[in-house]
Amino acid sequence: MRFPYNEKVLEHFKNPRNVGKIENPDGKAMVGSPACGDMVAVYLKVDESTHKIQDVKFESYGCASNIATGSIITELAKGKTIDEAKEISWQQASDELGGLPKIKAHCSVLAVEGLREAITNYEERHGLIKEKAPTTVDVIKRRLKSVMNPLSGLDIVRTNLLKDVQVNDGVVSIAIDLPENHIFATNIREEIQEKIETLWDVKEVRLTFAESV
Ligand code: FES
């Protein structure tokens, strides 16, 4: 069988750079693709005084295009400031790789989004967000679209695990339609906390699950 990938893509797929996890990262993100349901996680170590990316690693549950893109963008991002790294685009990643099949564009978008979200997470944790728009129910729902429902491999919004969201005076209340003793409840709880509590005007996140069964 002939692969629709060029040599460079195959080389990065077979020997991806910067694969893995960083313990106690300064910024991190896990994002899922609405197109295919695959996921990618990105971890950052950033120099606090220069805001330069000292180390970056990724884990991918995506396809060869996604892994090759994760490999190339982490190479591109290393040593750059967070502002410079935010400018890395999926088109640039694809060009660096000598081109990806059009049908695989969403795979590079996913990797690039992972990097950008990890940078945003760093900025939020360090009070560096410049545009401070108030947190609304829509903002919360958008964020929760990147929390995965491990039962299906899709996000908790699309799979209707998210029952209710309310935002009142900095307190975000979220109801999840899963028994609180469910095997995945702790995972989901932690992921939601991580995604929401870094928002600049959020004082508290209150999570409720359905009754145990
Ligand atoms: Fe899902 Fe490529 S098909 S990341």
Image (cartoon, rainbow, N blue to C red):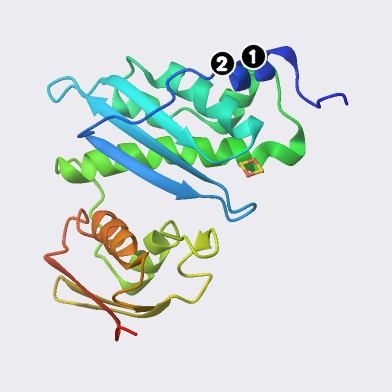
Residue at screen point 17% across, 44% down: 125
Residue at screen point 33% across, 18% down: 80
Which disc number belongs to residue 15? 2
Mark 2 Cα shell of 10 Å, populated few (<14), some (14-19), many (≥20): few
Ligand 1 positioned in quadrant: top right
Towards the viewer: 206 or 199: 206
Marks 1 and 2 sit apart, C-alpha to C-alpha, by: 6 Å
Q: Amino acid at mark 2?
A: Asn
> Is residue 77 positioned above or below 7 on the image?
below
Q: Position of residue 205 (x, y in %)?
A: 18, 68
Q: Quadrant of residue 105?
A: top right
The quadrant of the image that shows the N terminus is top right
The quadrant of the image that shows the C terminus is bottom left
Q: Which residue is mark 1?
A: 11
Q: Amino acid at mark 1?
A: Glu
Give the structural element (helix, strand or loop) at label 1: helix
Q: Is residue 129 visible?
A: no
